[in-house]
């Protein structure tokens, strides 16, 4: 959500009354912010940084996910084209809803397509509704009301619009009031379709196509899985608004943020995390983009950490409980990524990656410190024992006292990576605490952690920064041979900042500040801002993906690593600047993986990125309120403003629903 201009888009068919109402409410919001001393100039600055809107490329996402937060998930292809999509293994489509998932049944062969042509603008509203504006004058709003098995699409059309439901399986179709009912025998599933348009269908043994002719003006399509349609569209809109508002209001407040714009971004990022989680299994998609529609243990663990820190412990717990039972590559070691929909490991990708061993330990430790849930800790005990045993064996069994070589965070080269070593140190210390809490002997773990830390300082610290990556060589001398480590290019990586920031007291203070300064000097983009991953990074440029105009695109997560460091160091203005940069380089508040190093526009192939949203949440919650700022006033005002935003979207959708009902009567 981006201030007034974005709020005014939360309607399917603009009318003067609705627009006037929205302008009055937006004006009230801005006036209230000025009264409480929030930084008004940030709003103007961010609006300018985002550009003029739909006429500018890459400012809208091509992919989004929706979920009913219980057992349904949907992939929304917004119809926003990506330049040279085929080079990146993607296909441009009209607005389409696909990957219908019903847990525990699995993926269903159902697609809903709107023949609206390509889209010019798309975003996710704070009422958890995907809003799409097409080039052909159509407006679509799609929502999946929490706790229901229904998908509702509202349509405003300047002319007749055709939509199609494609079912790639044997099915029988029968007429019903306001639509049809399709029975898929292989899935023992009934799909109820209701609409105020006209319906026809063709059914063959292996496929069924249901054609929907939607009239000019207001219309709707409702799909319901194994439950009848709700004949009152307004009730569904109302229910969705209430449930989404309840969930957002149950979140921990970001008390230190200096503007409502940044606070709205915080809540939007929470919705992205919630929608990108498999509501039945607990896995997280790295991104709705088909390229990243897998559950990386690393990315998912940070998503769970963000949700648990924001107060959504049940969502985080669902992930941790899944992970406790997930198949492992070896004792204590996970596969790099898993199928988002089934949880099956991907044995073909990114092996070995050992950083997740420590990252998971950190996440479980943080969950326990928030909840003191001993039952969960005892359930996690077998996993912790496996992880700690593996780490102790690696470290004590190595002459270097390091964790073995892996592909680590950037998955680009095998070596001894600072990121992996540092996270295993942090995780081993946290796991030792948890085992000690349960009464277990942790002497071997403490010894291994101490040796690992010594080796990290010995081998990776060069007096100015931590080397990103080391490779081993055998050095032959007159007295025999010895194993030595030498730095491997590129020497610096912005990834070093995060493990340092997560526990500043664990590292020498002089080393931390010097490393951050070195990374900033070498990897900060002087043109558009933001931190690149490492020198010469060609990912998104001419390696694997090709949507960047040059090498070394700044990444959102690395810039927010810096923001977390600033917040941990007490430099809250620096942390706020990192959040502001991320917000200003988003797709209407949806945070990408990276931005173009020359234009600063979001790179569309992997946006939004779940980990980017997770880092935004973590940094937001790590900023302390301004001195003298009334915490109670902030709670009251932020709650009121968030409620107003959701109510605005609800009122405008209700108006749409009322017009639809008038057409039916």
Image (cartoon, helix red, strand yellow):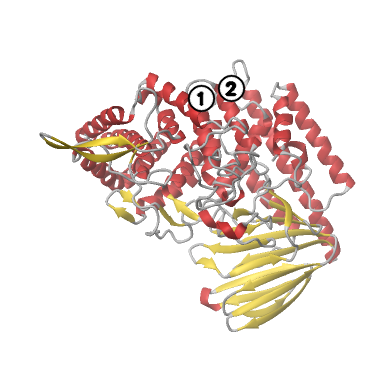
Q: In which quarter of the image is the N terminus?
A: top right
N-term mark: 2 or 1:
1
**Which residue does the image show at 50% across and 45% down from the upper left?**
538
Q: In which quarter of the image is the C terminus?
A: bottom right
**Which residue does the image show at 56% across and 42% down from the upper left?**
594
* Image quarter of residue 95: bottom right
Q: Is 242 on the left-hand or right-hand side of 404?
A: right
> Measured from the top left, where is residue 415 in percent x and y?
33, 43
Disc 2, SS: helix
Circles 2 and 1: CB atoms closer than 8 Å: yes
Q: Is 402 on the left-hand or right-hand side of 253?
A: left
Instruction: Name the residue that disc number 1 marks.
Output: 566
Disc 1, SS: helix
Q: Is 144 on the left-hand or right-hand side of 309?
A: right
Seen as rendered, the residue at the extreme left is 479
Q: How crowded is mark 1: few (under 14 residues within 10 Å), some or many (20 or more)?
A: many
Q: How crowded is mark 2: few (under 14 residues within 10 Å), some or many (20 or more)?
A: some
Marks 2/1: CA distance? 8 Å
> Measured from the top left, where is residue 590 in percent x and y?
62, 44
Q: Mark on residue 573?
A: 2
* Image height of 53 relative to 517, above or below: below
> Measured from the top left, where is residue 40 in percent x and y?
73, 25
Can residue 439 be seen at all in this image of the molecule?
A: no
Q: Which of 595 and 500 is in front in this view?
A: 595
């Amino acid at each position: 959500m981006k201030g007034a201009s974005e709020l005014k888009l939360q309607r399917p068919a603009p009318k003067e009354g609705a627009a006037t109402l929205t302008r009055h409410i937006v004006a009230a919001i801005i006036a209230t912010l000025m009264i409480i001393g929030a930084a008004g100039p940030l709003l103007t600055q961010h609006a300018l940084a985002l550009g003029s809107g739909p006429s500018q490329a890459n400012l809208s996402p091509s992919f989004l996910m929706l979920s009913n937060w219980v057992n349904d998930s949907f992939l929304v292809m917004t119809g926003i084209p990506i330049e040279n999509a085929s080079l990146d293994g993607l296909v441009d489509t009209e607005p389409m809803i696909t990957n219908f998932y019903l847990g525990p049944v699995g993926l269903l062969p159902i697609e809903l397509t709107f023949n609206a042509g390509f889209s010019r603008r798309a975003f996710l509203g704070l009422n958890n509704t995907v809003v799409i504006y097409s080039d052909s004058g159509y407006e679509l709003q799609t929502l999946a009301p929490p706790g229901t098995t229904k998908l509702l699409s509202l349509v405003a059309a300047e002319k007749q619009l055709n939509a199609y439901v494609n079912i790639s399986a044997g099915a029988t179709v029968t007429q019903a009031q306001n639509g049809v009912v399709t029975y898929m025998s292989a899935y023992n599933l009934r799909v109820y379709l209701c609409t105020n348009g006209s319906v026809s269908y063709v059914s063959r043994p292996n496929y069924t196509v249901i054609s929907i002719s939607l009239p000019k003006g207001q219309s709707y399509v409702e799909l319901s899985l194994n439950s009848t349609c709700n004949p009152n569209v307004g009730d569904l809109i109302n229910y969705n608004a209430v449930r989404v508002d309840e969930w957002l209001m149950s979140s921990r407040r970001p008390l230190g943020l200096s503007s409502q714009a940044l606070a709205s971004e915080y809540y939007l990022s929470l919705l992205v995390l919630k929608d990108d989680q498999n509501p039945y299994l607990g896995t997280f998609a790295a991104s709705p983009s088909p390229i990243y529609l897998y559950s990386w243990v690393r990315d998912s663990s940070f998503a769970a950490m963000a949700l648990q820190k924001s107060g959504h412990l049940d969502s985080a717990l669902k992930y941790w409980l899944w992970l406790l039972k997930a198949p492992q590559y070896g004792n204590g070691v996970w596969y790099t990524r898993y199928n988002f929909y089934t949880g099956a490991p991907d044995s073909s990708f990114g092996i070995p990656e050992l950083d997740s061993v420590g990252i998971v330990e950190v996440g479980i430790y943080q969950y326990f410190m928030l909840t003191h849930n001993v039952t969960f800790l005892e359930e996690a005990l077998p996993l912790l024992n496996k992880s700690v045993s593996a780490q102790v064996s690696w470290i004590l069994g190595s002459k270097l006292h390091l964790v073995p070589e892996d592909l680590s965070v950037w998955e680009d080269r095998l070596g001894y990576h600072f990121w992996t070593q540092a996270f295993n140190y942090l995780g081993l210390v946290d796991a030792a605490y948890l085992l000690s809490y349960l009464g277990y002997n942790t002497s071997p773990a403490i010894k291994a952690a101490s040796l690992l830390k010594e080796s990290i300082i010995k081998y990776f610290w060069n007096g100015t920064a931590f080397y990103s990556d080391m490779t081993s060589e055998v050095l032959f001398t007159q007295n025999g041979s010895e194993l030595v480590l030498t730095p491997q290019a590129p020497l610096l990586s912005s990834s070093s900042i995060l493990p340092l920031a997560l526990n500043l007291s664990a590292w020498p203070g002089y080393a931390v500040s010097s490393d951050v300064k070195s990374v900033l000097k070498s990897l900060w983009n002087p043109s558009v801002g933001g931190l690149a991953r490492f020198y010469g990074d060609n990912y998104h440029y001419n390696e694997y993906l090709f949507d960047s105009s040059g090498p070394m695109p700044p990444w959102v997560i690395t810039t927010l690593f810096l923001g977390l460091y600033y917040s941990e160091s007490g430099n809250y203005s620096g942390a706020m600047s990192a959040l502001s940069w991320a917000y200003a380089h988003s797709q209407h508040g949806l945070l990408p993986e990276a931005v173009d190093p020359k234009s600063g526009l979001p790179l569309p192939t992997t946006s939004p990125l779940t980990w980017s949203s997770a880092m935004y949440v973590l940094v937001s919650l790590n900023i302390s309120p301004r001195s003298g700022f009334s915490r109670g006033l902030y709670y009251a005002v932020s709650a009121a403003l968030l409620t107003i935003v959701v109510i605005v979207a609800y009122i405008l959708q209700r108006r749409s629903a009322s017009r639809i009902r008038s057409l039916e009567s």
